[in-house]
Image: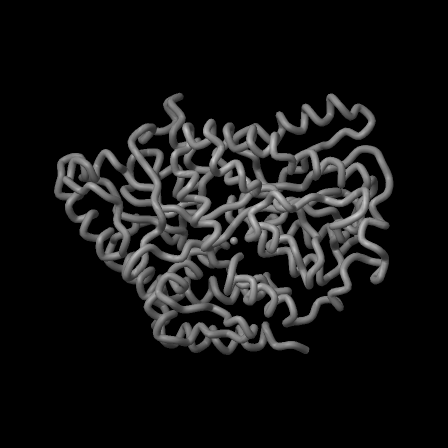
Amino acid sequence: MRRTPLAGAVTGLALALSLAACGGDGGGSPGGDAAAGSELTGRGPITLATGKDRSGNMQKMIDAWNKAHPNEQARVVELPDEPNDQRQQMIQNATTKSDAYTILNLDVVWTAEFAANRWLVELPKAGPNAVDTSKLLPATVTTGEYRGKLYAMPLTSDSGLLYYRSDLLEKAGIKEPPKTWQEMWAACDKVKALPEGKGVDCYLTEVGKTEGLTVSTAEAINSAGGTIVGADGKPTVNTPQAKAGVDFLARAVKDGRMPKAALTLDGEGGRRHFQAGKLLFHRQWPYQYELANKKDGSSKVAGKFEVAPIPGPNGPGAANLGGHNYAISAFAKNKATALDFIKYMADGAQQKANLLATSQAPTVAALYSDPEIVKKYPFMPTLKAAIENAKSRPAAVKYGDVTAAIQGAVYDTLGGKTPTDQALSDLQGKLGALTTTP
């Protein structure tokens, strides 16, 4: 994930949902009124709990840290691929007050839940140990905050992009990527009429019963002008706009616009499908760019694709804001070392090196116009605009229950089990109970 978004209305959404639901009094880390940073003591070995690093670059950065800090070695604890499973393991670690994980690599939408439950230590914004967020994209900083306090440092950002086979569009006489859903379907029909288009599926966004489905649902609904939860924290999913978004996904599955295995493919399965040359349009995160362009034989589409903003019903759609932030476990030892390690990993030089090696979106704003980076990744200005205008999944304190409700309702619709109207009506009721202030 890569995902794995918060400007404008997004800020209001995140704040409203952060204030909703219980799960702690929101006072932050244990100690309640203790000054930010007062708990950040202790030096020695640390661990980083994170999802799988497919690039290998994370370990290279950690090796450099370890070489410079022989008495404060960092070690990766690799968690499962699926974000839901990562979150569950982190929660299990926190609820048992285990010190096994020092630093947590959190999906941006988990901040409210982990901070409200006092599983994280507040990071200092001022003083000699302060973390500097002044050079970061404002949208990314918001993802690390809860009730005005900083609990996680944004390390990578993310926004949904439309990967497309530029070679096939060119052969079909199509000069620009689609800006609307209808333009995308029309382009598919033209490409599939070509000899080169036989056996190529039209489109894929994650619709399996995973966190990816929540992302796809949010993007489809937001692109259609709807929301899942309003700025006041109340659910708004039972609307014509939300129905239009979910119907777009349902029709794409029903009409065969998506691969037959779409309902079982996760993000990595989709990536492999695209890299095998079997997909024309793919909604994916930036990390795929570097992997799909490898010329080592692992990708059949290297040099044959480009990226663009995701389409919507009447023009460019509303991408989802993703990314990952580093937070310090409230139960960890050696928190002072952990803070220094986070500053090291978040530094602009490290973010640039990581971006050049992996195509993962950075949080440092200046990197999006860095000549060396733009030369290698011409889509960086497009990505920056997408991040700045992206919208978030509901950043709820009870996020696990919220995302499970969304996934269950929409998956049943996509599988033909429940009509869209009924699914959204039921979801409205479930979200109402999950976002009600106790």
- How many marks on residues? 0
Q: Depth check: give the residue in front, 240 or 11.
A: 11
Seen in the image, is 179 located left or right of residue 120?
left
Q: Left or right: 190 with respect to 394?
A: left
* Residue 401 sits above or below residue 275 on the image: below
Percent x, y for residue 5? 52, 53
Q: Is residue 42 left or right of residue 206?
A: right
Residue 69 in the image: above or below residue 19: above
| Residue drawn where x is 47% and y is 62% of the image | 407
Q: Quadrant of the C terminus?
A: bottom right
Q: Which residue appears at 47% of the width and 68% of the height?
A: 228
User: In this picture, is 245 found above or below 377?
Assistant: below
**Residue 403 visible in the current orientation:** no
Relative to 289, 158 lies left or right? right
Q: Where is residue 288 drawn, in percent x and y?
A: 43, 37
| Residue occupying the point 35% across, 51% down | 310
Q: Is residue 274 visible?
A: yes
- Expressed as whole percent of the image width and height from the top left, the position of residue 107 reads 58, 50
Residue occupying the point 45% across, 40% down: 286
